Image (cartoon, grey):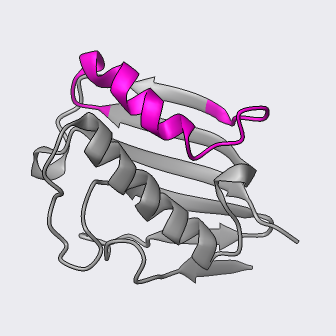
Amino acid sequence: MRQVVKTGNAPAAIGPYSQGVKVGNLVFASGQLPLNPTTGKLVEGDIKVQTQQVMQNVAGILKASGTSMRNAVKVTVFLRNLSDFAGMNEVYGTFLDPDAPPARSTVPNVDLPYGALVEIEVIAEAEG
């Protein structure tokens, strides 16, 4: 059974897609930009500030679907500049279980909406 995930703890979709979709025991969180969920505007700051906001947005979607980053199985990171990798990685890692991180791909040199420095999408296992 397919269930659309919608929460105020992440930015509203800016196009014809859902914040997330839960199918069986998997949750697919759409790519999140560093947008403030309340204002819908890009947060100002460097890669660390933007990654923090992105991960908070992802966490909000996962929480709304009954799971968390501890249950993430696959993450895809899109970076505007590969030189931001270390800063992104530093903040990203604080949201994970260091003993059981998910699989991950990082795609550099991507022109992201609103001039964002980072976008992250997640697939996670639902709890229970």
Q: Nearer the viewer, residue 47 or 75?
A: 47
Which residue is pictured at 24% across the width and 62% down the height?
35
Q: Nearer the viewer, residue 12 or 49?
A: 49
Q: Position of residue 45 (x, y in %)?
A: 16, 45
Is residue 23 shown above or below 43? below
Image quadrant holding the N terminus, namely bottom right
Give the total of numbered labels.
0
Image quadrant holding the C terminus, namely bottom right
Q: Position of residue 14 (x, y in %)?
A: 24, 70
96 vs 31, left or right, is right
Q: Nearer the viewer, residue 26 or 84?
A: 84
Q: Position of residue 94 (x, y in %)?
A: 55, 41
Q: Within the magenta stretch, is there residue 85?
A: yes
Is residue 47 shown above or below 107? below
42 vs 31, left or right, is left
Which residue is pictured at 40% across the width and 83% down the height?
8
Q: Quadrant of residue 127?
A: bottom right
Farthest residue to the right: give it.
128
**Residue stretch in magenta:** 79-103
88 vs 75, left or right, is left
Q: Position of residue 3 (x, y in %)?
A: 63, 81
Q: Nearer the viewer, residue 101 or 1?
A: 101
Which residue is pictured at 25% across the width and 68% down the height?
36
Is residue 87 shown above or below 18? above
Farthest residue to the top: give it.
83
